[in-house]
Amino acid sequence: KMFIGGLNWETTDQSLREYFSQFGEVTECTVMRDGATGRSRGFGFLTFRDPKTVNIVMVKEHQLDGKIIDPKRAIPRDEQERTSKIFVGGVSQEATEADFKNFFMQFGRVLDATLMMDKDTGRPRGFGFVTFDSEAAVDRTLERPLEILGKYIEVKKAQPR
């Protein structure tokens, strides 16, 4: 499955399908539209019968309806959601990296725990990242409000860069 960005507002399901059919058989193809106005949202999705076709498409520049378009491999939503890393904000300035790591060990095996430091002052910046050995540990950190050294912290799944 591919995400196709940068579409011309005039591009239709049909013209998108016709263009990409030169690379292989397209089984599904949709230009995403605004539910209220019916106008194109400037992107779409398509699926090739043979998943290897995606690799062929990725190596060249594409132009459709007078616009350079941006095809990318679509990442399934469930894969986007899966992570063994969390972002932790609102960490007390008093907390050490050891406090930080030790606190999160109650949720699962910690592979890495980093409190971000200010380059100039060497003081903690109040946030960091923790990587666990499982997604289940991440889920456990999200079950209830948490506090380190008496200060409530914000915990979120880390977004891939």
Image (tube, rainbow, N blue to C red):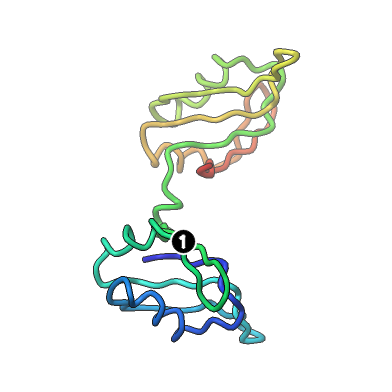
Q: As displayed, is residue 109 above or below residue 5?
A: above
Query: Which residue is located at x 42 percent, y 25 percent?
Result: 110
Q: Position of residue 37 (x, y in %)?
A: 66, 86
* Residue on which disc 1 sits: 61
Q: Position of residue 158 (x, y in %)?
A: 53, 41
Query: Which residue is located at x 65 percent, y 34 percent?
Result: 89
* Nearer to us in this view, 1 or 127: 1
Q: Position of residue 74 (x, y in %)?
A: 42, 61
Query: Which residue is located at x 59 percent, y 76 percent?
Result: 8
* Nearer to us in this view, 72 or 145: 72
* Nearer to us in this view, 160 or 31: 31
Q: How many marks?
A: 1
- Image quadrant holding the N terminus, namely bottom left
Would residue 143 be visible to someone looking at this image? no
* Nearer to us in this view, 68 or 151: 68
Side of 72 relative to 53 (left or right) = right
For label 1, count other residues whose C-alpha is less than 10 Å away and answer few (under 14), some (14-19) or many (20+).
few
Query: Which residue is located at x 59 percent, y 73 percent?
Result: 42
Q: Position of residue 31 (x, y in %)?
A: 50, 78
